[in-house]
Amino acid sequence: MFFASDNAGPALPQVMQALVDCNAGHVMPYGADAHTAEAVRLVREAFEAPEASVHLVATGTAANALALATLSQPWETIFCTPVAHIHEDECNAPEFYTGGAKLTLVGAGHKMTPDALRKAIEAEGTRGVHGPQRGPVSITQVTEKGGVYAVPEIAALAEVTKAYGLPLHLDGARFANALVTTNASPAEMTWRAGVDVVSFGGTKNGCPGIEAVVFFDPAHGQEFELRRKRGGHLFSKHRYLGAQMEAYLKDGLWLDAARKANRAAGRLAEGLRKVGSEFLAEPEANVIFAHLTRAQHQALHADGAVYYLMDGPLETGPADEKLLCRFVCDWSISDEQIDTFLALL
Amino acid sequence: MFFASDNAGPALPQVMQALVDCNAGHVMPYGADAHTAEAVRLVREAFEAPEASVHLVATGTAANALALATLSQPWETIFCTPVAHIHEDECNAPEFYTGGAKLTLVGAGHKMTPDALRKAIEAEGTRGVHGPQRGPVSITQVTEKGGVYAVPEIAALAEVTKAYGLPLHLDGARFANALVTTNASPAEMTWRAGVDVVSFGGTKNGCPGIEAVVFFDPAHGQEFELRRKRGGHLFSKHRYLGAQMEAYLKDGLWLDAARKANRAAGRLAEGLRKVGSEFLAEPEANVIFAHLTRAQHQALHADGAVYYLMDGPLETGPADEKLLCRFVCDWSISDEQIDTFLALL
Amino acid sequence: MFFASDNAGPALPQVMQALVDCNAGHVMPYGADAHTAEAVRLVREAFEAPEASVHLVATGTAANALALATLSQPWETIFCTPVAHIHEDECNAPEFYTGGAKLTLVGAGHKMTPDALRKAIEAEGTRGVHGPQRGPVSITQVTEKGGVYAVPEIAALAEVTKAYGLPLHLDGARFANALVTTNASPAEMTWRAGVDVVSFGGTKNGCPGIEAVVFFDPAHGQEFELRRKRGGHLFSKHRYLGAQMEAYLKDGLWLDAARKANRAAGRLAEGLRKVGSEFLAEPEANVIFAHLTRAQHQALHADGAVYYLMDGPLETGPADEKLLCRFVCDWSISDEQIDTFLALL
Amino acid sequence: MFFASDNAGPALPQVMQALVDCNAGHVMPYGADAHTAEAVRLVREAFEAPEASVHLVATGTAANALALATLSQPWETIFCTPVAHIHEDECNAPEFYTGGAKLTLVGAGHKMTPDALRKAIEAEGTRGVHGPQRGPVSITQVTEKGGVYAVPEIAALAEVTKAYGLPLHLDGARFANALVTTNASPAEMTWRAGVDVVSFGGTKNGCPGIEAVVFFDPAHGQEFELRRKRGGHLFSKHRYLGAQMEAYLKDGLWLDAARKANRAAGRLAEGLRKVGSEFLAEPEANVIFAHLTRAQHQALHADGAVYYLMDGPLETGPADEKLLCRFVCDWSISDEQIDTFLALL
């Protein structure tokens, strides 16, 4: 009954096997190995982007901060939502990597709208050299609250960014989960819709630690490489990054894993709905924000369920007070675990 | 016949097995797992430093840059040798992580001497606010040219740093190899000799990607944690870092691996000596800088030997001109490979 | 009829005379001159803070950014209002000087309230190493919209910052104007109320370019000196900074100048009120945000009045539409200019 | 008898008068005033560079650091001599403004030679993404040890920088003094010889605080403007910068001042030579490094002469030991002062 995060589950067995399999003999370091080459090929293939510049890093924060730094100047501001991971959960990594760019918060929710974006862009960049200059726009797919942008929603945002000549970054820590929800292809969800760079996540969906930064305009590649090295994110034994991504993408493993996670979340949401729990937003992928009573939370915790409580305190207060919490399902959650959990309710 | 670097060989089977073994069930992310706890315990035990603050990262550049940034101010200068990895091979990562500190090059060789250090320190910090202020001293063990500091040599350097109130950092990318050479204990080579923080390497000695930063004064721990997160170096699925370090340290595996590497280098050096090759410095661990004639290099390359040529060009020039090259042996190099290589000479 | 800003008027004749007078013979550079010493003495005297660490710089942005950087860590967030000069008008200087700290916007208006501040602080610093850590609080006096904090209002904010152990910075670009409004002493408005550091402005109130950064805890002085030098803000011919501040503070010149500016703004506000103009906020010092009709703006512009229009466009739209504008009075504005201006309405 | 530095003397009366004269009425801030416009025009005229992008700042460190940052990337290294002001006397300002670029020291002396530069460039940029990338080259004219590059010497260095596609920066803190020595025109000494950007100093040669950064390729202008603002170096009351530079350049005032300074130094050098003092390098402009005996230094200090002693200690040691010192003459030093000084010897 572990719903704290999709970074808490085990890696996919096929990915672990790939790590073991690649561990033979000497290979050139720093990405000049066959596994990395194959991983890059598979990413390009998945995105139908044969020219894309593809770079592997081990953490999502590295992927986001390095990607945004490559597209920003230190005197610019990056547009994102108030709950964006880059704003709330990276301890100022974007500010660090960009050399002091600002983050401008767009709208009030977890999904950016074209109107809110246009308004935010219009409000910046009007003070000559005095204010920050307009910089990249960053959205998260699946959003931090479990929402999913439909492809036309992304395209509508991209239309705004293009109108202002600003690059569009997509934080795809849960990219695969969003694909499963929307039934779109990677290309449709990104460059065909107007996205310029993706942090393409593997870690939350079943890998030990692998993210690919994908620039659809390869002109950014060399600068990214220098930024990656300077940030300490270039692995010498790079084959262990390459092998992860290679296995993750081979034979649709990544989509299978995301399907399992989304299906598990669906089962969980259905059960929660039945016991009258209300959702912060309609669950669309593998992340659920739901309200349960304090009494329910107390019972669940007592029985060992693990998940994040957003409100509090757990221990004291009216038993029937509704407290918000987050459930995340990873690929490895079994129906049995979910049913045991729901039975407790 | 792969002597390009010890980052090119396979990981130790026990370490890979540990990765596979740890891959079961859900565990808390970001270091709150049992493998990380055990890894920290084993590092402290190895260093006889039960209070030490121990932090795992995946690359040596991250370990060095984060450790030095924690001990520096942006207006200071870090003292290191002209061939220090932090100066030559990290694409300005120390400057980046410190927020713009300088590196002052001490002496002319790969081993810092107390006299050269004292002279360099004296020359800095004499201009009030105009010049850079004195900052940490960083040495590399095994040095970038294959030399090893004896424990009293480290203690003599530490005596100088203490006299000026400066912290001493040891870049221990090949720490285990130096231990094998000197027969010292980790404690003797570090805090007992006056070292304040170590980048304790696992990657070059048989792990996929693991380094521990060890502060003997735990007061630095919290700042390091914030710097690590901000740098994108905090892994969510941290168990895969913990498991590596745990397996690496268990039952002396790390020292066995270093012994193999050093022994292989010894065998190679002996063979080189027999064919009249001259060394840049007497090989002491697993790194050899040697001169061979252009003709010898051409023959070796033709037969598929892989190593770095420091001089050039390979293709044209007098056949008997001596060209410097570097050989590094990792734990996995077999006697057979070495003998085949030597036979080519 | 120049109301664009108080940085557009001439300097006080006494300050210019002081520049001329100090221009004799050789004196030691970098602040080791008698004028700087006297300026520091006078600042301490004005603030009744004989131990304060006082540093002169030439621009308000330098004063703010250097002061905040001295009190922050790069992984922290600085709390300020959404219209703070440090947020809107310094092209990311605080982010630059702090090495990438974040700015968290408190409340929705130009005056910070204790409740809004408490709420903002509570919302940050709750995510361990994942989110930014809590850093300094910065308020502006006179506010960017012309409001003035009463001393008890500052004290109430300081009570909140102290409760969380956070330093309180006061951007006093128009400090003298606020003193005149509140009739408080410099000490009452700052350290007695709980302020830790002030950017004490001279430029907007009649000097060519001089600001003093005043730390009431002198322990911050040496770090500030290094940051100032590193930022290129240490003047070699420092006497020209010292002389400005010396003349500014001598014989109450600074308060006289502020009185003139506030009185001029009062006259202007009265006139605006008579013609039915509505204020964004009740004018309290020398800055007025008022609404006039497009027709009125057009007439004023046609006759050469200079001020900033916040809404637009000026040229087209309903003649009776109310458009917001800003008027700032400096010490040199004459009654005649104001009356001429008002006559146009 | 004040020879400590040319930043210790008074400003030229004409420059002070210009400050007084410009102090009338309201003008637009931030450089949109007539004095700044005229200053820019005069700089362009002096350099015969009608398209140049010209920017005023108040300190030499700001000029150098901002100019170099505009031409660098954080992962690059800047080539300069070991005694360069940017390396020794700016408390890491270049590292700060560039976001962490490195400085590579070229040769061993105060004047860079093409051979040493070529060698230094060749040694960098050979390690792919591992080492720093090649960045701008910076030379100082007059050098920090009082030497002057002849125009062909600059051209020879520029030939090297062009061969590698690197920009050439000239730190012209004492640019006027070098012009007087070489009898070259500003254009000949800069863009015609291959210089890309100049820090054109006014402060040391008789202004309170004014430097112009001159980019011969105006494409760099907008980025510089943003960097200047972000660094807190954009003055609101910009007319006081404009007026300084305007007066400095009008009617050849700047060259007259430099002639006086150089002539004074020539008189001083002649006198020193007569008493047997030896020079570190043959004095060429207004800076002299000379050896005098401890006894001579003691006598001079006792009689109130002010200058920097590079060796020490003054008080104890053999009376006839030669100690190096620096004398700098500014425009205001009178023959009488020099003769009085020499008479003491």
Image (spheres, coloured by chain):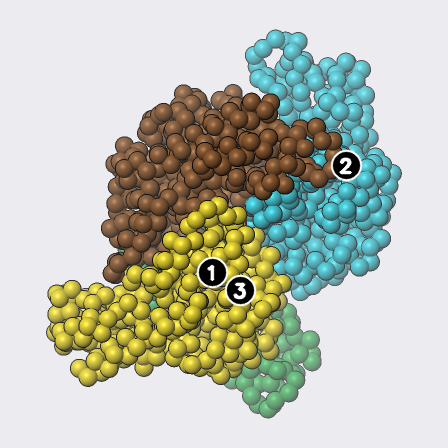
Chain colours: A green, B cyan, C yellow, D brown
- The mark lying in front, picked from 2 and 1, is 1
Q: Which residue is mark 1?
A: C63
For label 1, the SS is helix
Q: Is residue C240 above or below residue B82?
A: below
Task: Identify the mark nearer the N-term, 1 or 3.
Answer: 3
For label 3, the SS is helix
Q: Which residue is mark 2?
A: B114
Residue D199: x and y in percent read 41, 39
Q: Residue at x 35, y 75 (%)?
A: C259
Asked if one can make out residue B294 in the rendered structure from this viewpoint, the answer is: yes
Q: CA gap, disc 1 to disc 3?
A: 19 Å
* Letter of the chain that mark 1 sits on in the rendering: C
The tag on residue D306 is none
Q: CA gap, disc 2 to disc 1?
A: 42 Å
Inspect the image, locate mark 1, and give the three-letter code of the amino acid beneath it: Ala
Q: Which residue is mark 3?
A: C41
> In what quadrant of the picture does the N terminus of chain B appear?
top right
* Letter of the chain that mark 2 sits on in the rendering: B
| Image quarter of residue B157 | top right
Question: Which one is in front, C253 or D149?
Answer: C253
Q: Is residue B309 above or below residue A291?
A: above
Check whether the beta carbons of the residues at disc 3 and disc 2 lie within 8 A of each other: no
